[in-house]
Image (cartoon, rainbow, N blue to C red):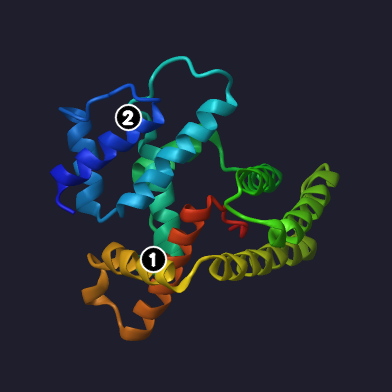
Amino acid sequence: MEPPDFCREIESYLCRKNDGHLIRVVGPSFELVAGWARLGVPIKVAFAGIDRYFERYYRGGPRRRPVKIDFCEADVLNVFDEWKRATGVVGGQQSAAVGSHQAAVGRQSLPEHLERVVTRLTSARAAGSIDETFDAIIDRVSADLDVARAKSGGVRGDERSRLLDRLAAIDGDMLALARARVDSAALDQLGREADEELSSFRAGMASDAYARAHEAAVGHLLRARLNLPTIAFH
């Protein structure tokens, strides 16, 4: 997607998130968002970053004013960095903007992460994007949240390693259930979207690396389609 088209898509999405209030992506904001396009940020990854900012904004109480796209920069870059690590298309280097954002707000703790996961899963269940087959997943994450909360000093050492391994396994089980919930036509469409997301990076990738990246990109798109969180924690 060329930068002007990318910016128009972002502007339209931000308008919807702002309940129809139009905040123009022009001037410095245009240059900011065009920079995301030049970095190769997939449009749905950018949407996920915007969603993350809005989630945090709403947790702070009633919305006070329409959100400008500039406020979403660090979250967009954070989600892009996570997408890169998941797909393996680029090394895990973070931008200065991401680093400064994390320094300002602090890295999300394990209990905070699990609370967010349980909230997303229960919201998806209530909205009907997932069904009762996911109830066991919610129960397993809730049990691990209780474990994480029970340790006043945090879960450490071997116990933490076992917990992180368990979360990664639950994440895989959740994605398997998600794949079973969508039909083959939808999966084919997600596969084509994953090809588009990876197009900027494909030339420098070996076939096996691309296959792994494609699988991870489909998983990311599937999460977005069903409003599912990433349960694994790094």
Task: Residue 92: tell me if it is visible.
Answer: no
Q: Which mark is residue 190?
A: 1
Q: In which quarter of the image is the C terminus?
A: bottom right
Q: Residue at x 77, y 51 (%)?
A: 142
| Left or right side of 89 for 55 | right
Q: Can residue 209 be seen in this view?
A: yes
- Determine the residue positioned at 57% across, 56% down: 230
The front one of 16 and 10 is 16
| Residue at far right of view | 150
In the image: residue 32, left or right of residue 232: left
The correct choice, above or below, for 191 with respect to 64 in the image is: below
Q: Which residue is drawn at 28% across and 39% down?
A: 10
Give the x, y percent position of residue 82.
45, 56
Q: Residue at x 48, y 69 (%)?
A: 183
Total count of labels: 2
Pointer 2 residue: 15
